[in-house]
Amino acid sequence: MEVFRTPDSAFENIPDFAWEPRYAEVADPDGGTLRMAYVDAGPADGPVAVLLHGEPSWSFLYRHVIRVLTERGIRCVVPDLIGFGRSDKPLDQADYSYARLVEWTRELVVDHLDLREVTLVGQDWGGLIGLRLVTENPDRFSRVVASNTGLPTGDFDMPEVWWQFRRAVETTEVLDIGRLVAAGCVHPLSDEVRAAYDAPFPEERAKASARVMPTLVPTRPDDPATEANRAAWEVLSTSEVPFLVAFSDRDPITGAMGPILQKLVPGARGLSHPTIRDAGHFLQEDAGEELGQVVAAFMGGG
């Protein structure tokens, strides 16, 4: 497996993100290992929140959320998915699959860090991966916060705006990562922040993950990931694990999933599910402090 590792120098001028990276080795399918980066912030003995990002961002997306949670005594573990951030980046799109993304993240959370009583916070692909982790490792998770995400099986079509996004990512000659993130926000991003999203990808070839991720979303009933996602839905449909749906009000991609999750997951019943106003798909950028306060309150941290 040919892998790109972003040099540390690319991350020297990242604003508002002073946490030092940590690293774990996870298995690659060729018998080697990949370096997976993560942030581990807050008190070591505090309740644990695992914050999972999606496409095409990295742990930097959660900087405002991390600050709120750690101030309230919550330990935040924030991985960079393989292919993103400071984590290793396989260069062949064929090296990525939904199952591998789940397994790489499981290795970090379960095998390397041995986390328990975890609150999952998942947005975008962070939910697609995280909900699989929750349902396949139920003894490890005590709460879920689903934010602008879902668990598609391919039985229902994706919205047209998502198909437009997929076609653009697949076909554009130069993939502008900062612009993609900015397009998913309501409020403008500063040049420094846009540059921070570009930083993990100093070469075009390193963007294989960002290009392939939309093609890994199940869009037909015979997708390779459909069976596992249906099995996850079976677990979710009977799970009493507290399940908070914290969606934004201006996300055309996943907005329709919020009411479905509230209706179908027993752990969501009886909870007051917040709608985070004036925020787009990347609500961590538009309203990160508010999302942090929602998560902290849900975890009993104020």
Image (cartoon, rainbow, N blue to C red):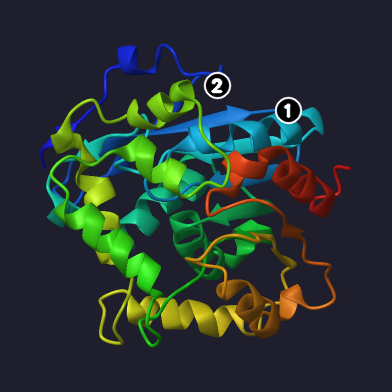
| CA distance separating discs 1 and 2 | 17 Å
Amino acid type for the residue under numbered disc 1: Pro
User: Is residue 101 shown to the viewer in this render?
Assistant: yes
N-terminal-most mark, 1 or 2: 2
Residue on which disc 1 sits: 43
Quadrant assignment, res 246: bottom right
Q: Which quadrant is the N terminus positioned in?
A: top left
Describe residue 37's horizontal placement relative to residue 139 as left or right: left
**Could you tell me if the residues under marks 1 and 2 are in contact, i.e. CB atoms within 8 Å?**
no
Q: Which quadrant is the C terminus positioned in?
A: top right
Q: Position of residue 126 (x, y in %)?
A: 48, 54
Describe residue 257's horizontal placement relative to residue 291 as left or right: left
Q: Position of residue 74 (x, y in %)?
A: 75, 37
Residue drawn at x 47%, y 66% is: 253
Residue on which disc 2 sits: 17
Residue drawn at x 17%, y 39% is: 174
Label 2: how many residues lie within 10 Å, few (<14), some (14-19) or many (20+)?
some
Furthest-right residue in this view: 302
Q: Position of residue 155 (x, y in %)?
A: 38, 88
- From this view, report whether residue 241 is shown above or below residue 200: below
- From this view, report whether residue 301 is shown above or below residue 41: below
Tell me the tag on residue 30.
none
- From this view, report whether residue 7 is shown above or below residue 71: above
User: Is residue 25 shown to the viewer in this render?
Assistant: no
Label 1: how many residues lie within 10 Å, few (<14), some (14-19) or many (20+)?
some
What secondary structure is found at the residue carrying circle 2? loop
Describe residue 276's horizontal placement relative to residue 164 as left or right: right
